[in-house]
Image: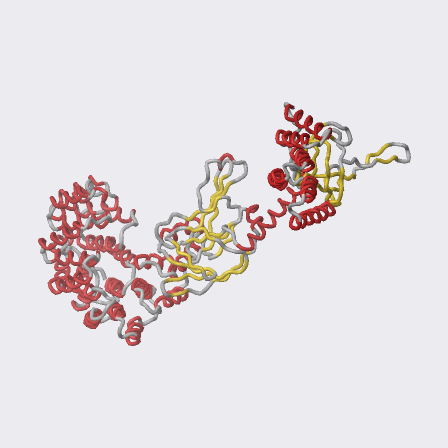
Amino acid sequence: MSIGSGGRCHQGTIMSNPFGVDLFGKKNPASRHSKCCGCRRLTVLSSYSTLRFLHFRQFPLLPLGRVHIIDECLQCGSRGATSERKFRKQRSRDLASMMESFSKHADNPDTALHGMQTLMGYNEERWFMDLQHSYGRRFYDHMQVQFLIAQGLCRFGHFNEAATYCRKAIVLGAGPKAEELLALCQSMSEKATVDAPVESESLVRPYAFLMACAAALATILVFQGLSAMHHHNAWLVNGSPFPYSVEIDGKIHRLLPRASTRIKLRLGEHEMMRLAGPKRNAPVLFEYTTPLVKQKLAHESLVLNPDGLALLLAETMHKNNTTNRFYVGETVYILTGINHPFSKFPAWASAKRSPQSRLFLHPATNHLDAVKAVDQYLGHTKARTHARRILQADPAPAEIDALLSWAVDDMPIDAAVAFLKQGRLDAAPKLGWHLFYQDYMTEQDCAYDLQKEYALLCKQHPDTSLYYYLLGRVAHNPDSAHKLFIKSEKGPGSNGLGYAAIARNLLCSGRFKEALPFSEKALDRDPGNVEFNELNMRIHLALRQYDPLIFQIRRVLADEPSNPQRIADLIKFLTLAGEHQAAAETAARFPDAQVSLSAYFNAARYYAVGNATDYADAMTESGIVVEKLQLPLMNSDIQKAHALLSQNEEHDYSAHLVMYCAAQRYAHPEIAEIELAKAIREISPKTYDRKKAVAMLSGATPSPSQQELAALRLMPQEKAILCTALGFMHPQQQTLYFRIAQNLNYTPEYPQLLLKKWMRQPSRSVGTP
């Protein structure tokens, strides 16, 4: 190979030229054993194609053309060279001429000699071997053919076969040249080692460094191209407890409840649409243009939340602590710094010096838990907004009431009413939404006629039976409400609600026998309804029909209820019915209800059979703070009971009414006045009937009639306490009020015995004005 030229500077200092011309690579190598024309030594002569390059300090810069090297000596380096283009052109011409001679003069020995010489010149070993077999036999007595075959075999390294043909040529008179060739073949055969032929050498090896740089650049370009088409850094997240499908750019994806799914998404503009059965929500348009390389460097993730309900937590692990970021309320998130989206931290994450972050869904099991989590992490305002967002996404009916309480909390009345009316106008009425709306409008004392509003809805939707039930709830006339409840059961939708409302109203009025058939009809419509079952049990308890009550309780327990509060209520009914042994067995059967060792139920057993003394002792042992008020009242210690009630603010208005009755009974007018004011203040006027009760206690409705009390839809025990208080408040009608109270005071639990005692003994005081 050539060496770059040098030069001399003006001062006489020699400077090497960094540029030069070299040959790089060996392609199509061919070797033969012969004597070198330069050094006259027996060696391997090689021919091959190579590239002539201009280089700079051994780094190739510019190819100057292909060169064909002929018979390069491995010992002295002498060789012949010609242009690769000329060599190939001449080779094609010579081989074509040889083939034409074969076709015309195949049996002519001169043709054979010319053909084999051509193949030997271009190192066509395989072709030569085929010819020597045929022409060696065909011209077995031709001296020149035999000698040329010997030369070719020796050229291609077949020395033993070449020696055989040499001997034939000598016999045929080849002379000294054949003898010299025979000696060469014998010496090459006997030689222990033979110079190795030249091997192929890649023409691109000099370009390894430049090609590595080019490959790295090409890889970046390919990644950029792929990022413009498809990538995997998009996540679909379902924040609701229900499965649904979503369509993105015409492709439908199925999302499992509270789960994440990784999808392919090209860069550019996209359209996302949530599918709810046959219903299609409005499409969401978004654009994502971050290249894949930038995504990897910034640890960027695209998170799509079609429902907008997912609470995302980004947890970052630092060297000494962990921090959290929270995201909620959006449909498209582009989050950076997320090393492990929707996966756990790997084992090596804690050993990393740089912070490691992961993204995951908050493990809320229902919408209400999610709202509470938003309230905890992001504040009350965002919790209210999230509750409203959930309500617009059609949540489970059981969650509507609690979610609406969050949604309208601290909201101006006009805005809350507008929001509630918006959901009330849905094509398919949501019962929970309507019930909350009615109670809210009544509680806020809005100057709005609900009866007129729902009468209009019934007129507009005569086939929707649920509206008749809702109209019955706000009807002021009990007879009209009764008719509307009956009408609501003539079509689908109410599912026993109308019958249950009638049974509840009759129970509240003390007409227990009339209530029982309607509660049975409600249970026939929906046997598994918890409220219907409890209503039916209360009616049986009011009628002292303990056998059917116990039968119904056992039927419910046979279904293995899982709610601890539900099991506790059933044990309570068994206790009130006098089935203490069955109550104890049930408590032992359901230890998860955590009532088997409750001192309260032991005390309730004594109270149910009228044993106030043992009940008081059991309550003392129970240590229940809110129940300590009962003991002084049983002992007629009004001052102590009043002091305890003033210390504890956890009691509802009925506790203050009981305290009022006790103060009136034992002539403590100043305490009676205080407790009555507290009772009126504590009553939540959430319903029309509660508002009527406030009017009766405050004197706005003087001396309410028996019909007015019968129309009051309060539960029997609550109404019994109210009527007892009215009896002390209006001594002239005390007999009437006490008679109503005694009819309703059937439940054998506190304060039944106290009310009986106070109504049985003459009062020591006059009524409170």
Task: Provide residue 379's location: percent of width, then percent of height.
Answer: 44, 52
Q: Is residue 180 above or below residue 224?
A: above
Q: Is residue 53 above or below residue 735?
A: above
Q: Is residue 528 above or below residue 595?
A: below
Task: Provide residue 225's location: percent of width, then percent of height.
Answer: 58, 53
Left or right of residue 90, residue 309 in this image: left
Q: Is residue 201 visible?
A: yes
Q: Residue at x 28, y 74 (%)?
A: 458
Q: Residue at x 11, y 53 (%)?
A: 551
- Camera-side residue of 58 and 684: 58
In which quadrant will I find the N terminus?
Answer: top right
In which quadrant will I find the C terminus?
Answer: bottom left
Task: Provide residue 187's location: percent of width, then percent of height.
Answer: 67, 24
- Camera-side residue of 123 and 435: 123
Left or right of residue 331, residue 641 in this image: left
Left or right of residue 448, residue 249 in this image: right
- Camera-side residue of 128 and 677: 128
Task: Provide residue 491's location: percent of width, then percent of height.
Answer: 22, 70
Q: Residue at x 70, y 28 (%)?
A: 179
